[in-house]
Image (spheres, rainbow, N blue to C red):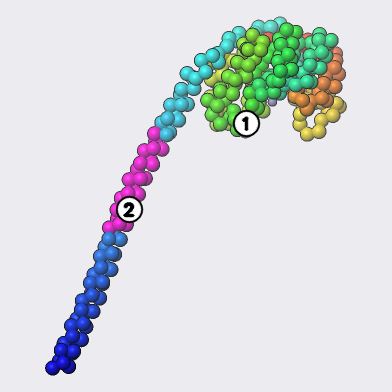
Amino acid sequence: MNKLIYFFLVIMLGLFIIYVFRNEEVDVSNDNINSLNFNYENTLILAELENELVAQKKHHIHIESNEAQDYTTLFPDLYTVYDVPDSMDKGRRIAYLTFDDGPSSNTFEILDILDEMNVSATFFIVGSAITKEGEGALRRIVNEGHTIGIHSYSHLCNEIYCSVERFLNDYNMVYQQIYDITGKRANIYRFPWGSNNSYSKGIKDDLINEMERRGFACYDWNVDSNDSVGRPTEYSIRRNVEKDLETRDYPIVLMHDSGNNKLTVKTLPGIIKIIRDKGYEFDTLDNREPYLFEW
Ligand SMILES: [Zn+2]
């Protein structure tokens, strides 16, 4: 009898084990179904996310394009008045000395030379270079009959050329500085690396148009002294000016008055003499019509 009960129990246990295993199989297959559902839901969620991202991107582009349109409403004080001069019609030989990247201690020495030799020139100012001492240089530039132009506040390509807004923001800072220090509203400017540089390619036309709309006149150069490139010598600087001077109409000579340009100061009297001996007068750039690179 006991054996019979024992046999019965073993059969029951066997059936129970079969039942459990079969359920597990069902569970496993349910898992698969769940996982399939999950993947399906995931796909839906991913699709929704993707749609959302596309929508956000469109919104972002919309905001950006709004910003691009709105730069005309930014910086309401960044406006000036520029009248195109007529002094070029008189058939005179006129040269324009220009100094970029100052003020520095060299600016004072350049101003002394210009004063001694009775020459007027133009200075394109970098706002971040203006020290307390430099403020005195700016006031001297104005008081001694020279012209101040804007060159930028930071002179950093990744600061000024990433958007029109950033460019205007940078120029607005130096424009206000110059006004606060000298009482003059600058109305001419020069792009760092000139108007045709590789950094501003995508926004160049917008920049020029917007600055023109605000009243500013732009000036590149057509005679490069190369006083800030490579390892210039007094001879190379003089030679660079001399070789191009008479091939240009109303030559605009590019030089620099940053702290590194000691050699420019040293060479300047000789350069003035060369230009004067060729029959040129000197004037400030605001008396010349605006000039952009022809290439
Ligand atoms: Zn510069």
Left or right of residue 45, residue 149 in this image: right
- What x and y, as percent, mark residue 19? 20, 76
Q: Residue at x 82, y 30 (%)?
A: 232
Q: Quadrant of ligand 1?
A: top right
The three-letter code of the residue at mark 2 reads: Asn
Identify the residue under disc 2: 42
Q: Is 2 in the magenta?
A: no
| Residue numbers of the magenta segment | 37-59
Q: Residue at x 53, y 20 (%)?
A: 210
Nearer the N terminus, badge 2 or badge 1?
2
For the question of whether residue 222 can be seen, the reply is no
Identify the residue under disc 1: 157
The three-letter code of the residue at mark 1 reads: Cys
Left or right of residue 215, residue 141 in this image: right
Q: Quadrant of the N terminus?
A: bottom left
Q: Please, what secondary structure does the residue beneath circle 2 have?
A: helix
Residue 233: quarter of image: top right
Q: Please, what secondary structure does the residue beneath circle 1 have?
A: helix
Left or right of residue 168, residue 48 in this image: left
Q: Residue at x 85, y 17 (%)?
A: 269
